[in-house]
Amino acid sequence: MMRRFLCGAAAALILTVTGCGGKTETPTGTEAKAKPAAEASKPAEGPKGPYITKFHLGYAMGSDGVVTVDGGVFAQGETAYTSFEVPNTPADSKIRIVWNLQPDNKTVAEEEMPVRAAYSTKADTKSWPLGEYLMQIYISSGTLNKQNMGLGTAALKIVKDRPR
């Protein structure tokens, strides 16, 4: 029984291999012409407007202003540190960070910063009630003709005791 199966499998394999060696067609006329190099592959362009990179939310910040220990669950009263960069930011821009208690979207903290290469901030959560929060990052710029354009969000949670 096994021998019959192996012979059948070998025959199917031979037929498949020999069937794949058929004649290939060559395009004729305009199809045969190669596309110009510039048209064939264009390099991918990066984002044109401001966007967030190197975002970190966590428990500790280094002397360079970058968050060193990432995390999203904080004990009540713990400081929440944030660091990020916003490339392609016009000189007249302002970055605004808003912390909202969810689900009612009640603002518990807000900060506005002038344009710079890198941003870092900290939120004192001592007076914040336990619960889920949403951090929202906005940009306003006359050059961009935008007011409070959303750049990104991050969620965090305040609990009685953070698991270590």
Image (cartoon, rainbow, N blue to C red):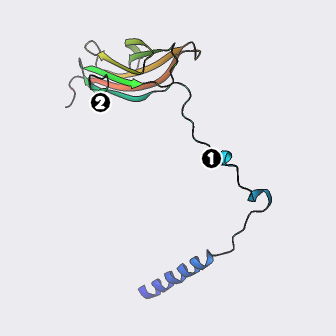
* Numbered tag placed on residue 71 in the rendering: 2
- Quadrant of residue 30 in the image? bottom right
Query: In which quadrant of the rendered image does the N terminus lie?
Result: bottom left
Name the residue that disc number 1 marks: 41
Type of amino acid under label 1 = Ser
- Residue appearing at x 58%, y 15% in the figure: 143
* 12 and 26: which is toward the camera: 26
Q: Mark 1, residues whose alpha carbon is within 10 Å: few (<14), some, or many (≥20)?
A: few
Residue 119 coordinates in the image, percent (x, y): 38, 20
Residue 118 coordinates in the image, percent (x, y): 39, 22
Q: Earlier in the sequence, mark 1 or mark 2?
A: 1
Residue 146 coordinates in the image, percent (x, y): 56, 16
The total of numbered circles placed on residues is: 2
Residue 67 in the figure: left or right of residue 48: left
* 128 and 80: which is toward the camera: 80
Residue 104 coordinates in the image, percent (x, y): 41, 17
Type of amino acid under label 2 = Gly
Residue 127 in the figure: left or right of residue 117: left
Observer able to see residue 157 = yes
Outermost residue to the front:
37
Outermost residue to the right:
29
In the depicted structure, whether residue 87 falls above or below residue 77: below
